Amino acid sequence: MSHPDTIDWDVACEDEMCSFNSMGIYEVVLWPKDRKVVGSKWVFRIKQGPDGTVQKYKARVVAQGFTQVEGLDYDQTFAPITKFPSFRTIIALVAEHDWDIHQMDVKATYLNGKLKEEIFMEAPPGFDIPEGMVLRLIKAVYGTKQGGQVWYEDI
């Protein structure tokens, strides 16, 4: 009999693979002889509620973007971010003026940004990819150098 945690991680991995497939993140291609192929790995995280109870098992495929080559696999990496003191100032203004504030959470954020560059990535364990084949990324995945910038341009 399987341990319950094993089943939860299997479900989390299956959810991530379904996201990849339904969002058209990649296509399976022959391993290119003249190009560097970026590695990948699974990253696992347990999301807990305020009381410490397990809310969700999260599995994410992450590209090993540290092996990407500037000018070949990526060009721009800049994405604007908000520094925490600026965010606190905005929240203080909202409270002071009794304004409404809205937030959004985009599931699989980086998986929405379309890549301009051609990036090839090894499939992590569990992806049913034939030997000698790799994933040509169509959209950014977590870990790619340009993931944040591509998402910013898309939004």
Image: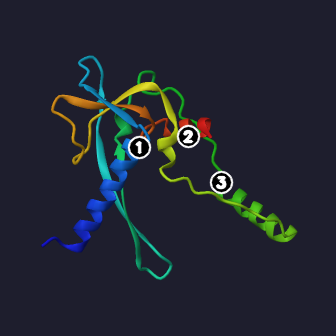
On the image, the x and y values in percent for residue 78 come to 58, 36
| 111 vs 117, nearest the viewer | 111
Circle number at residue 151 = 2
Q: Which of labels 2 and 3 is toward the front?
A: 2
What is the distance, in whole Å, between disc 1 and disc 3 at their CAs? 33 Å
Q: What residue is drawn where x is 43% and y is 45%?
A: 142
Residue type, numbered disc 3: Lys
Query: What kind of residue is marked 1?
Result: Ser
Task: State which quarter of the image contains the N terminus.
Answer: bottom left
Mark closer to the chain start, 2 or 3: 3
**Residue type at the position of mark 2:** Trp
SS class of the residue under badge 2? helix
- Per the model, the C-alpha gap separating discs 2 and 3 is 18 Å
Marks 1 and 2, Cα distance to the nearest angstrom? 18 Å
From this viewpoint, which residue is outermost toward the bottom? 51
Quick one: SS at disc 1?
helix
How far across and how far down the image is residue 107, in percent?
A: 50, 53
